[in-house]
Amino acid sequence: MFAVGSYNTLRLCDKVGWSHSLDKPDTGSVYDLVWSNDATQIAGACANGSLLLGTIIQRKLEWQNYEAIQSGRKSLLIRDVLSDIKEKVELPERIILISLSHAHLVLTLPSHCYVYAVTNFNTPCIIELRDSNTSMILQAEK
């Protein structure tokens, strides 16, 4: 993902250049854009002295008949497409990484890792992270 700022315009694009979001803030020119270390948040300095702040949401993952969509900074919507059962997961901190595979949903937050079995989204296994610089989740079958 990358962001482009110009006069009263902020655009979020994927790695091949397709636009995913367009915002028209009344800020004048966007002078500088800076991503957070985990690439989930962006800040922009503008000509009229405004500060733009943004967070990546609407990330979508699919595995078999399950679909997970990040609906907010701290929330995730999980849906079983076969039965159309929906569950909303609320978290205490913002979501950094999401992985859905091999019957488990894995989320990393700044200080914790949550592991959910797809059969039960009510009781996760919570792991405290000593190093909050998690850059990748790789799930394997066993």
Image (cartoon, helix red, strand yellow):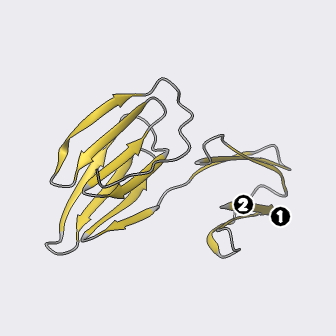
Image location (x, y in percent) of residue 74: 41, 44
The residue sitting at 25% across, 46% down in the picture is: 116
Q: Where is residue 13 in the image (x, y as percent from the top left)?
A: 67, 68
Question: In the figure, is residue 70 to the left or right of 39?
Answer: left
The amino acid pointed to by label 2 is Ala
Residues 128 and 94: in front is 128
Give me the residue at 53% from left, 38% from top. Answer: 134
Residue 131: percent from left, percent from top: 53, 27
Q: Specify the label residue 7 is tagged with.
A: 1
The residue most toward the top is: 130
Q: In screen coordinates, is 15 left or right of 101?
A: right
Identify the residue shown where x is 37% and y is 34%: 92
Q: Given contact means CB atoms under 8 Å apart, are the residues at marks 1 and 2 in contact? A: no
Q: Name the residue under label 2.
A: 3
Task: Describe the element under mark 2 as helix, strand or loop.
Answer: strand
Label 1: few (<14), some or many (≥20) within 10 Å? some
Amino acid carrying mark 1 in the image: Tyr
Q: In which quarter of the image is the N terminus?
A: bottom right
Dot 1: what SS? loop
Q: Is residue 128 above or below residue 66?
A: above
Q: In the depicted view, which residue is nearer to us: 99 or 67?
A: 99
Residue 79 left/right relative to 134: left
The label nearer to you, 1 versus 2, is 2
The Cα atoms of the two marked residues, 1 and 2, are separated by 14 Å
Q: Which mark is residue 108?
A: none
Query: In which image quadrant can residue 22 be found?
Result: bottom right
